[in-house]
Amino acid sequence: MPVPLAARTHRIQPFHVMALLGRARELESAGCDVVHMEIGEPDFPTAQPVVEAGRQALADGRTGYLPAAGLPALREAIADHYQRRHGVDLDPGRILITPGASGALVIALALLADPGRNVLLPDPGYPCNRNFVEMVNAEPRAVRVTAETDYQLTAERAEAAMDQATAAMLVGSPGNPTGTLATADGLRSLAGLAQVRGVGLIIDEIYHGLHYGDPPAQGLEHAPEAIVVNSFSKYFGMTGWRLGWMVVPNDWVPVAEKLMQNLFISASTPAQYAALACFSSSAEAIFEERRAAFAERRDFLLPALRDIGFRIPGTPAGAFYLYADISALAGDSSSFASSLLEAAHVAVTPGIDFERTAPEAHVRFAYTTDLDRLATAVERIRRHLRGGA
């Protein structure tokens, strides 16, 4: 008799873009030049001061387990970062180091969501969040957000979607796939709703640092009882090192640490020592140069795509994504993305990975490649839409 797999394995969906990425790699192997705008990974390598710190950690034999909560010096450096950058006074004891932001989100949901309860998620939003909720046998409940709310979950929409089984709300600022920011008032309203209704609030800030105007509202300032998640992957450029952190209320620290001890013992030791260098003046100068480069790319790509016929409401103020409505150009985003790859050799992500309400109407562009490549992509897309690719 065959062994049945757990039901959650059928509910958890794959990244649909991975099939598209696989096809892009096949085309490249056949000699085609593909412009990649589908994957949310910065194209810059890890900054040299961080690489050198990692090498030194290995040379010094820093390869054993660390405490589950993380390297004390790194927790203190992160607390200092919040003070310097955001003016937030934070006890380092509330900071827990995790294997990427993904590890933090799983711990956050394990803290808050029992089987059978539901977690409110903005739709569109980061697809893995739905699957993290499924992993703890809770129900991901999509709440439609639109350009009217700058693609951010509002307290009004959240309250309308709540019931007695709601355990938590999970929001992202800057958001993926839209690049929009939560406002201070918005965060305070969500925090107030969470307190009144007795539900958790998780704020995903992994794109903090990548903003192109005024700095984003800081969750710890406006929602001090929320769980705040961040990462060394995006602004700090350490994607493959798999390192993140979470900030939890004081009373929850021992429980979160207990879960971490059991689920992954501790995050990577060499990565934690390397991450200490992220807060050096030399590394911070590199990160700011790269932020300026992302801003320049956004400012080129946004008007260029609008000129072709993509509808992108507002000006996304963070991350490195543009979420575009293709309704005036094509009827189905998955078919459009496939044909764009095959005919024009430009890879973008269809909306099916991000939303349930109108996935066929949207694609996400990641400006994680240089300006020359973006210009090449725009010209290829233009020709493709004119039937000349």
Image (tube, grey):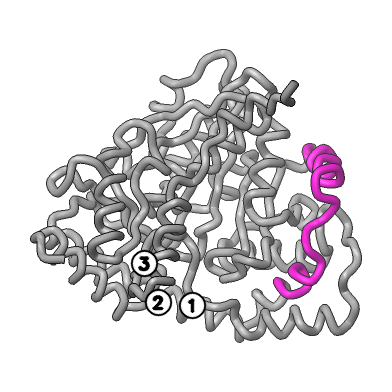
Along the line of sight, which residue is nearer the eye, 174 or 61?
61
Could you say which quadrant of the image residue 186 lies in? Answer: top left
Q: Does the magenta segment cover residue 269? A: yes
Q: Residue 26, image x and y in percent?
A: 43, 64
Q: Residue 52, image x and y in percent?
A: 71, 85
Which residue in the rendered view is the most extreme toward the top? 164
| Mark 1 → mark 3, Cα distance in angstroms | 17 Å
Residue receiving disc 1? 288
Disc 1 residue type (three-letter): Glu
Nearer the camera: disc 1 or disc 3:
3
Nearer the camera: disc 2 or disc 3:
3
Q: Which mark is residue 292?
A: 2
Q: Do the residues labelled 1 and 2 touch (CB within 8 Å)?
A: yes
198 sits left or right of 330 in the view: right
Asked if 173 appears above or below 300 in the picture, the reply is above
Disc 2 residue type (three-letter): Ala
Whether residue 62 is visible here, answered yes or no, is yes
Disc 3 residue type (three-letter): Tyr
| Mark 2 → mark 3, Cα distance in angstroms | 13 Å
Residue receiving disc 3? 367
Along the line of sight, which residue is nearer the eye, 366 or 22?
22
Could you say which quadrant of the image residue 137 lies in? Answer: top right
Q: Do the residues labelled 1 and 3 touch (CB within 8 Å)?
A: no
Whether residue 317 is visible here, answered yes or no, is no
Give the secondary structure at mark 3: loop
Give the secondary structure at mark 2: helix
> Residue at coordinates 47% horizontally, 73% vertically from top-left?
43
> Residue at coordinates 54% horizontally, 43% vertically from top-left?
128
Which badge, 1 or 3, comes first in the chain's sequence?
A: 1
> Residue at coordinates 52% horizontally, 37% vertically from top-left?
13
Looking at the rendered image, the quarter that the C terminus falls into is: bottom left
Q: Residues within 10 Å of mark 1 (few under 14, many from 20)?
A: some
